[in-house]
């Protein structure tokens, strides 16, 4: 509803952005585009990291946007900038997963990333997978939720992901995001509006 309308308004505004100030390193221009690039990078990182390292998503999204800055000179239009942010966030999240699972293997834990991902594919939303079709449906639902959450403001999106995807309590969310517990409830209400 309102989240989709807000997301569409952000995208319309983003399409009107002039790339030249960004390519010249204008700080004000970067602050302006941060509002529509951040949710994209965060949603991609959260989707990839959610089953294993959900608390790392914000760091990965931040690093992705930092990596995006020098690459803006190669971009021809604003939509390409958005896709590049998503791509960088995805690759950084995958790299983090590979690094963490490699560390676990070196400590004697022998599961590979691929084995763990297969085992968790149907459990993303707290359900066990009874069939490959059910696993695929759960994966598609998680992707849709990620895209929808990506249209929300960053604080609301983070609360929504932590509550509905990561199944954290209000207290856990408040502690993790360093916000009051009352803000968790307010952000959930905003996100569902």
Image (cartoon, rainbow, N blue to C red):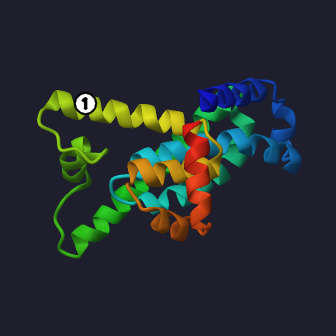
Apparent side of residue 10 relative to residue 141 in the rendered image (left or right)? right
Q: Quadrant of the C terminus?
A: top right
Q: Nearer the viewer, residue 132 or 74?
A: 132
Q: Nearer the viewer, residue 97 or 3?
A: 3
| Res. 76 visible in picture | no
Which residue is pictured at 31% across the width and 44% down the height?
Answer: 125
Q: Position of residue 69 (x, y in %)?
A: 71, 47
Q: Position of residue 36 (x, y in %)?
A: 69, 38
Q: Position of residue 81 (x, y in %)?
A: 67, 34
Apparent side of residue 140 relative to residue 55 in the rendered image (left or right)? left
Quick check: 96 above or below 19? Answer: below
- Label 1 sits on a secondary structure element that is helix
Instruction: Check disc 1 and report the residue beneath it.
Output: 136
Corner quadrant of residue 39: top right
Q: How many numbered discs sit on the rendered protein? A: 1
Q: Quadrant of the N terminus?
A: top right
| Res. 30 visible in picture | yes
């Amino acid at each position: 509803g309102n989240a989709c309308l807000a997301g569409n308004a952000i995208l319309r505004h983003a399409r009107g952005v002039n790339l030249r100030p960004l390519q010249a390193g204008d700080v004000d221009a970067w602050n302006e585009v941060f509002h529509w690039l951040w949710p994209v990078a965060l949603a991609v990182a959260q989707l990839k990291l959610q089953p294993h390292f959900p608390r790392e998503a914000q760091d990965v999204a931040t690093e992705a946007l930092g990596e995006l800055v020098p690459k803006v000179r190669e971009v021809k239009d604003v939509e390409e900038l958005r896709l590049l942010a998503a791509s960088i966030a995805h690759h950084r999240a995958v790299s983090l997963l590979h690094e963490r699972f490699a560390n676990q293997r070196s400590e004697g834990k022998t599961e590979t990333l691929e084995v763990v991902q297969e085992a968790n594919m149907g459990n993303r939303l707290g359900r066990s997978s009874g069939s490959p079709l059910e696993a695929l449906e759960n994966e598609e639902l998680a992707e849709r939720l990620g895209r929808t959450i990506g249209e929300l403001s960053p604080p609301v999106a983070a609360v929504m992901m932590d509550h509905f995807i990561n199944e954290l309590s209000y207290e856990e969310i408040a502690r993790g995001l360093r916000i009051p517990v009352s803000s968790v409830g307010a952000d959930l209400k905003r996100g569902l509006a």
